[in-house]
Image: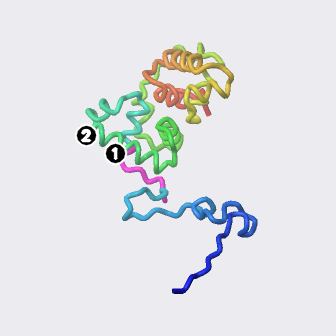
Amino acid sequence: MRIMETSVVTPLEENGNAFASMPFLRQKPKARSARSGRRQPAKSLDLSLKEREALTWTAAGKTAAEVATIMSVSPWTVTKNVSNAMHKLECTRKIQAVTKALRMGLLIDATARLRLDPTHVGELTDKELDLLRWADAGKSAWETGMILDFSEQTATYHLEAATRKLGCVNKVHAVAAAITLGLIQ
C-alpha cells in the first residue's frame, strides 16, 4: 500500500492572501442562467404595459388588491408586475421604482391618476420636505430618523403629516405627488 503525502496550505501561505483558499469570497458573482430560474440583470428598461399600469396605480396610492380589481387580475399578478418593474428599473424598494418610472415618463397618464390637491402645499415644513426627499431616495422612516438624528416615530409622524397636507393616502402617493408638483427634484 502506497501512502501519498499531502500538504496543507493555510490561507495566508497562498500569496499572502487570507481569502485565497475561499473562492466564493474572491470571485465576482456570475450571471445566473435562465435554466436556474434566477433573475438575470435587466438589459433594458422595456416595461410591459401591465408593469407600467401597476406602477401607475401604485403611485396613485392604490393597494395591490385595489389595483387587481381595476386591472381585472389577481393581487399576486399585480405584486409580480411591480416586482418585475422594480427589477428592470434596478430598484430595491417599491417607492424607488415608482419615482424612477415617474421621472422617466414611464407611468401611464400619471398626472390625471394622482388626483392632486395642492391646496395645502405651502404649509409643508422643511422637515416634512426633507422626509419626502429621503423617502424618494428609498429610505425607511427608521433610516431617515438615523440620518436626521431623530426617532422613527418622529419621522413617521412628519411623513404622515406631509401625506395629509398633500391630500394623499400613503407615502408612495405623497412622494409621487411631491415630484409631480415640483417640490422634489
Residue 136 is one of the magenta-drawn residues = no
Cα gap from disc 1 to disc 2, whole angstroms: 10 Å
Relative to residue 110, is residue 29 drawn left or right? right
- Above or below residue 80? Residue 57 is above
Front residue (pair 177, 118) = 177
Identity of the residue drawn at 68% across and 22% down? 149
- Furthest-right residue in view? 16
Q: Where residue 20 is drawn, which disc sits there?
A: none
Q: Which residue is mark 2?
A: 73
Tell which circle, 1 or 2, labels the residue nearer the N-terminal end.
Answer: 1
Res 184 → quadrant: top right
Identify the amino acid type marked 1. Answer: Lys
Res 129 → quadrant: top right
Identity of the residue drawn at 43% across and 65% down? 33
Q: Which residue is mark 1?
A: 50
Identity of the residue drawn at 40% across and 42% down? 82
- Above or below residue 176? Residue 41 is below
Query: What's the magenta region?
Result: 43-52
Identify the amino acid type marked 2. Answer: Val
